[in-house]
Image (cartoon, rainbow, N blue to C red):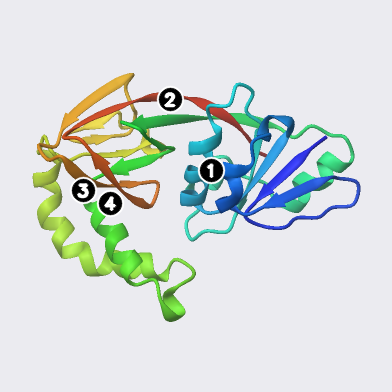
Amino acid sequence: MRILSIGKVLEHTGLRIDSIEASELSHHHDIERYDYVVINGGDGTIRRVLTQLHSLEKPPVFILNPTGSFNVIAKIHRAPAISNVLDMLATGKIPKTQKHHLFRINDQLFLFSAGNMGDLQHIFLSETLRFGWLKHGIAKYILAVIFLLPVHLVMTPFMLASKTRFFIFTPLRLIKQFGSFYGEVPKELVIDLENEYNMLELDGDIVTVHGSKLHIRQAGNVRVVTR
């Protein structure tokens, strides 16, 4: 059994674990020989790693070791403690897995969240506050919500009615669509933002997407270890 850890050095008696930094991933050309890949980090790190690995002919099973502020993806899958997963693998047990569906906006991958509404404003301000004692933890996100609350209360109804604003958040898939909010990604959705360069929030990252038209579609799935 071969295991690759991305973003942190992991060791466990009875297991062979190779460790690399996320920045080295593009130069690591033999990922398919690994049975499991551990992703150490938050939602943004998971998105960036899966962007490079999800299209492999035989993708590995992914183990999440959440170290971010929100860790939404890990919460969705009730990711077990990394020590428990490694103990299980060391004794020859096969951990339980479930599918995580992936989506694309043009050439950008995302896993659960995308938009240019209040989510984008929130991430902008949260990242501005990422320094000093606010650098780690969720305090910066809570402060950003408090600071932006008056703006969101006024602007959200208008953004929900706008054809150039949208927000996708699949953990709320019970609400398939409400105005420009989507809890479920259809097979293909086209949104015209009327600008060639657009800043979007994807899983807590801020990215620039070129092209006025956004083609949003389903992009397969990967298997993630769960409880």
Q: Is residue 43 above or below residue 30?
A: below
What's the amino acid at mark 3? Met
Q: Nearer the viewer, mark 2 or mark 1?
A: 1
The amino acid marked with disc number 4 is Asp
Q: Which residue is mark 4?
A: 119
Q: Quick one: quadrant of the N terminus? A: top right
**Position in image of residue 178 (x %, y %):** 21, 33
Q: Nearer the viewer, residue 34 or 180?
A: 34
Q: Position of residue 224 (x, y in %)?
A: 61, 35
Give the secondary structure at mark 4: helix
Q: Which residue is mark 1?
A: 49
For disc 1, the neighbor class at 10 Å (few under 14, some 14 to 19, many from 20) is: some
C-alpha gap between disc 1 and disc 4:
22 Å
Category of crowding for the residue at label 2, using alpha-carbon neighbours closer than 10 angstroms: few (below 14), some (14–19), many (at least 20)? some
Q: CA distance from mark 2 to mark 3?
A: 23 Å
Q: Which-is-in-front pick, marks 2 and 3?
A: 2
- Who's the residue at 10% across and 56% down the image? 154
Residue 153 versus residue 222: which sits nearer the camera? 222
Q: Which residue is mark 3?
A: 117
